[in-house]
Image (cartoon, rainbow, N blue to C red):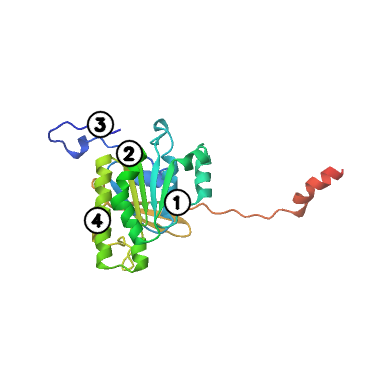
Amino acid sequence: MRKSIPPGFFTADQVERVKMSTGVNALDNLLEGGIEAGLTHLFYGDRSLHDDFLRLAVRAQMPTDRGGTGAPVILIDSTNMIKIERITDISNELELEPEDVMDRIYITRAFNSSQTYDLIMTQLESFFSRIPARVLIVTGLPNLYIDEGLTGKGLQQISHMAANIMKFTLQRELFTMVSAPSSPKSKLVPAGGRSLASNTQVHIRVEESKSYVRYILAKHPQYPVRNVSRTIPKATYGTLPLSYFLGGEETERE
């Protein structure tokens, strides 16, 4: 946990930073240890980034002595990104009981922009007063607004939500991840207006090809712009002789 800072003047390098590993080596290297408590991390770009969100949601269930928070996760989902089989796979990989993990990931779905706004602006406080979570994940913050046709009012609401998430994250020292698509005008910036970008302290652009995923650190209060990549494992295919499948029967006959 972050220690309280006594009054007086302190430079940034004197403030104790609390980080949690994402479970993705490339991302941890990019962020020098993982995501940081109290900062809102905006991921935007290819939808493949949501697999990293699922990994973090599971990894957060690990006890603190294994690099997790030992606390539940609150996930507000506007992209339908939950995959039970993927959560199960990651849980088994980390030697966690899948059912216990899923019991501690509290998922709320939004099906239209009004629901997204209500969840973020009026219900977020209630969620955390009832659930002792340390991680907040908001997927596709502007997505439903974009699907419905982005208006001036919609941009204003996105601005309000982003500001509320950033304030809430700082006050409670949460590990917070938000996702958005890239802007249709330029993949270099997130969709959802300038206010979404200005109310998130860390920006990570995600680009995927057939062979690798690239993470670009586009904004950070401490680190320079830079990027890392991780390779996508190739599927292996092979052909087995028919005798392989008939071997069991032949052995039994003998």
Q: Which amino acid does the dot numbered 3 rest on? A: Lys
Mark 2 secondary-structure assignment: strand
Specify the label residue 51 is tagged with: 1
Tell me if mark 1 has few (under 14), some (14-19) or many (20+) residues whose alpha carbon lies within 10 angstroms of its own.
Answer: some
Mark 4 secondary-structure assignment: helix
Identify the residue under disc 3.
Answer: 3
Where does residue 69 sit, x and y in percent of width and height? 38, 36
Q: Which amino acid does the dot numbered 2 rest on? A: Lys
In the displayed structure, 43 sits above or below 90; it is below
Instruction: Name the residue at 40% across, 59% down.
Output: 111
Q: Earlier in the sequence, mark 1 or mark 2?
A: 2
Q: Earlier in the sequence, mark 2 or mark 4?
A: 2
Q: Which amino acid does the dot numbered 4 rest on? A: His
Distance in Å between CA atoms under marks 1 and 4: 27 Å
Where does residue 173 sit, x and y in percent of width and height? 28, 40
Identify the residue under disc 4.
Answer: 160
Distance in Å between CA atoms under marks 2 and 4: 27 Å
Specify the label residue 19 is tagged with: 2
Q: Is residue 201 among the parts visible in the rendering?
A: no
